[in-house]
Image (cartoon, grey):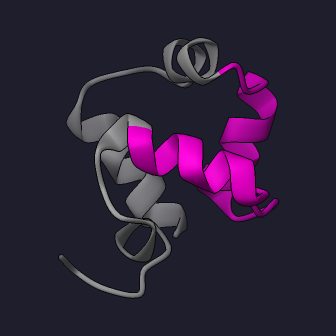
Amino acid sequence: MVSRLRQLRLDVGETIIYVSKQLKIDPNTLSRYELGKRQPDKEAWIKLANYYDVSLDYLMGRTDE
């Protein structure tokens, strides 16, 4: 999860600050998600998957598609 979430953000060339504002998530919280220090709740998982246009399974590392 950590590397995928971070990699998705880097692939689109956005900062943690930018993404956190778009998703209305605290930047420190988003950073903790990327580092694996905190797990997103259900609502946050859905926001992240929708934002990056990927499946929850992909975001969570359950599939490579």
Q: Main secondary structure of the magenta part?
A: helix
- The residue lying furthest to the bottom in this view is 62
The percent position of residue 12, horizontal first and vertical second, equals: 23, 30
Q: Quadrant for residue 38, please give it.
A: bottom right
Depicted 20 relative to depicted 35: above or below: above
Point 42% across, 80% down: residue: 61
Residue 27 on the magenta span? yes
Q: Which residues are magenta?
A: 24-50
The percent position of residue 5, horizontal first and vertical second, equals: 46, 54
Point 44% across, 64% down: residue: 3
Depicted 53 relative to depicted 16: above or below: below
The percent position of residue 49, horizontal first and vertical second, equals: 44, 51
**Residue 25 placement, left or right of 55:** right
**Residue 64 placement, left or right of 62:** left
**Residue 33 placement, left or right of 19:** right
Point 71% across, 48% down: residue: 43
Looking at the picture, tell me which residue is in the foreground, 54 or 37: 54
* Position of the C terminus by quadrant: bottom left
Looking at the picture, tell me which residue is in the foreground, 21 or 27: 21
Residue 36 on the magenta span? yes
The percent position of residue 46, horizontal first and vertical second, equals: 56, 51
Point 79% across, 38% down: residue: 29
